[in-house]
Every structure is written in C-alpha cells, then in structure tokens.
Amino acid sequence: MRPAIFGETATGFYTPGFLLKNLTVGNFYCFSTWIKIQGANSALIRASLKTEYRTYNCIGIVLAKNGCWSFLKGGFVLDSPSNLALLIFQNSNDKDIDITIDSSSLQPFTDQEWRFNQQFMINTQRKRAVTIHVSDQQGNRLQGAAITINQVSKDFPFGSAIAHTILGNLPYQNWFVERFNATVFENELKWYATEPDKGKTNYTLADQMLEFVRAHQIIARGHNIF
C-alpha cells in the first residue's frame, strides 16, 4: 500500500493518506504503517477513515517522536459498503507538522479467518500437553479412570479499568467478574484522590475496591506516584 494522497495545509505542511476502494461489510480491516514527524518534539498521530456515509475519527493512534520511526497499527469494521474511502493520518491536536509514512499495509479478513487464527494461537501459544496419573490412597495407579477437568481460573491476565461506581452495583460487578481477571482503578489510587487536601489522606474507596477485587481473585495494577 503506497501513499496516494497528500493534503497540503495553508502553512505548507502535508497530511498523508490513502484512497481505499471497494471496502465491504463483513470484513475486518487491519492496517499498519511506520510514522516519522517533523515540526514537533512529539505528537499523537491519529488515523481516521472517511467513507461516503460516515467518518471514523480514530481507528488507530500512536505517540510519534521526532528523529525516529514509530509504528501505528489499527483497524476498522464498516456498517455499510464503501466504493471509495479515504484513510488519513493527522496530528490529533490539529497543529501543523510534517508526517512521513512508510511500509504501510492494509489486510482484510473475515470472521472465519479471524476465528481460525485465534484457535491456532490458542493451540500453539496457550495450550500445553500434560500427563495425569491417578492413584488410590495407597498410591497404586488406577487404570481406565474417567477424568473430568474444569477450568476454574485464567492464567493470562485480561482486564479493564473500573471506577468506584462498581461498589454496591451488583449487575456491574457480575458483568465484570464474568469477563475479567485483572483490573486497574481509574482514579481511586491516584494521589489527588487519596489526599485531596495536604496531610489529609482518605483510602476508603480504594480499600473497598481492593476488597472487592481480592474477594474475586482479580489482580489489580497500581498507579505511579506523581
């Protein structure tokens, strides 16, 4: 995939983009590119997609730094087909900087292909062969024993942020516990939340949230001190 469009601003800076033809419904689209900027020490570069019917303002983002290449990867799914769409890369704060892109690619794939790759990765990366020996109380090995295995926990951390609004909210708690085994608090462990006034600390919400996640064997990531 090569750059096909360069939009020039009034101050002479360029915004790279691509013309994408015949995008279909039912496909997942994954794209990637290398980004280099000039005109700022760093910038959040955002990828956007414009079709005939809709604009997707952010389908990928990267913090690019001056003097080096940064990798941006994103994706999108359409709710209606598009004969001609525009994929562009812009500074998220709208300030003018030069953006250079290289080694770009766009890969469409179906849900079936995604599921196939998912299962392949599970089988090759997540599963392990095990040998089970069954014995009686005297240590004698039993032949032909029927074994049932139930997964009771997940080793791979998969989580999301939670806020103090989860406290006392049973539907929210049940929804979260069924899906995740890791979390991070949005603000409740940050300095300004636990010490709003100098010398007056209050960890009530943080403690209650930690009690909740520990009761469900969910790991919690802390916040840096700032």
Image (spheres, helix red, strand yellow):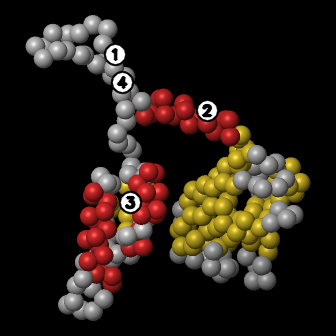
Q: What kind of residue is marked 3?
A: Thr
Discs 1, 4 touching: Cβ within 8 Å: yes
Q: Earlier in the sequence, mark 2 or mark 4?
A: 2
Q: CA distance from mark 2 to mark 3?
A: 28 Å
Give how far across and how far down residue 62 sits, in percent. Answer: 57, 64
Q: CA distance from mark 4 to mark 3?
A: 31 Å
Q: Residue, x 32% and y 8% (percent of image)?
A: 144
Give how far across and how far down residue 95 sits, in percent. Answer: 65, 81
Q: Look at discs 1 and 3 and give the one toward the viewer.
A: 1
Q: Nearer the viewer, residue 152 or 23?
A: 152
Which residue is disc 2 drawn over? 116
Query: From this viewpoint, is residue 91 visible?
Result: yes
Q: What kind of residue is marked 1?
A: Ala
Which quadrant of the structure image shows residue 93? bottom right
Q: CA distance from mark 2 to mark 4?
A: 26 Å
Q: What kind of residue is marked 2?
A: Phe
Q: Could you say which disc has been placed on residue 183 in the image? A: 3
Q: What kind of residue is marked 4?
A: Thr
- Quadrant (top left, top right, bottom left, bottom right) of the C terminus: bottom left
Relative to 102, residue 224 above or below: below
Which quadrant of the structure image shows residue 194? bottom left
Relative to 81, residue 119 above or below: above
Discs 2, 1 touching: Cβ within 8 Å: no
